[in-house]
Amino acid sequence: MAKTPAAPVPADVPDQATSGGKGRATPTRAEQEAARKRPLVADTKEAKARAKAELAAQREKARIGMAAGEDKYLPIRDKGPQRKFVRDFIDSGWHLGEAVMPAMVLVILATFIPVPAVQYYSFIGLWIFILFVIGDMVLTSIRVKQAARKKFGAERTEKGLGWYGAMRIIQMRFMRLPKPQVKRGQHPV
């Protein structure tokens, strides 16, 4: 067969590369398979180091988010507006429970003093202090529940807010997680 000359293309018809065509040749099957081939388990040192660095970055981001009180990073026990209200309510005041650990350290140091009366009275003093702390926990629990009912309504208040608040007051302020978001004396609204 004889070749027939191609018909001239008018100047106003764009070619395929500029009119939205892909502008490159279709890869062969062998090329596509070669591009997809990779090991199932990355065993290179670089891949392991990269994965370890990414995991460390995610953990650090979660740790910072939890300390800042971001709801997305909090454990289930700390999530929600009512729990945040209780944390702020507790963190805004002074509580005897914050001094339990230092008091116990003092009693331990007092046991090294070779005077039996000092050892005896330090233990008695610690137990009296613990009774005052328990009283503070009970009163604070009642106050937390009343404040939550007043703010959120009696029928919508979560269970366990009093216990949550009581457990928070026996932690030293700088050790609390999430970190306190309010200053002492700055009561939540």
Image: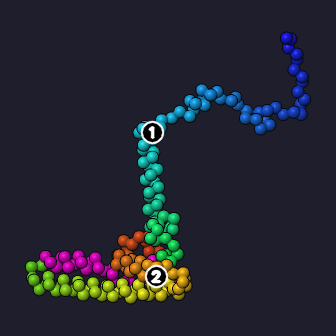
Of the image marks 1 and 2, the number of the one nearer the N terminus: 1
Q: Residue type at mark 1: give it.
A: Val
Q: Residue type at mark 2: give it.
A: Phe
Q: Position of residue 50 (x, y in %)?
A: 45, 45
Which residues are drawn in magenta?
A: 85-112
Residue 102 painted magenta: yes
> Which residue is the site of mark 2?
89
**Magenta region, main secondary structure:** helix
Indicate the quadrant containing the N terminus: top left, top right, bottom left or bottom right: top right
Residue found at x 45% / y 46%: 51
Q: Is residue 161 above or below residue 66?
A: below
Question: What element does badge 1 sit on?
Answer: loop
Residue found at x 44% / y 62%: 63
> Which residue is the site of mark 1?
41
Label 1 packing within 10 angstroms: few (<14), some (14-19), many (20+): few
Residue found at x 30% / y 87%: 132
Question: What element does badge 2 sit on?
Answer: helix
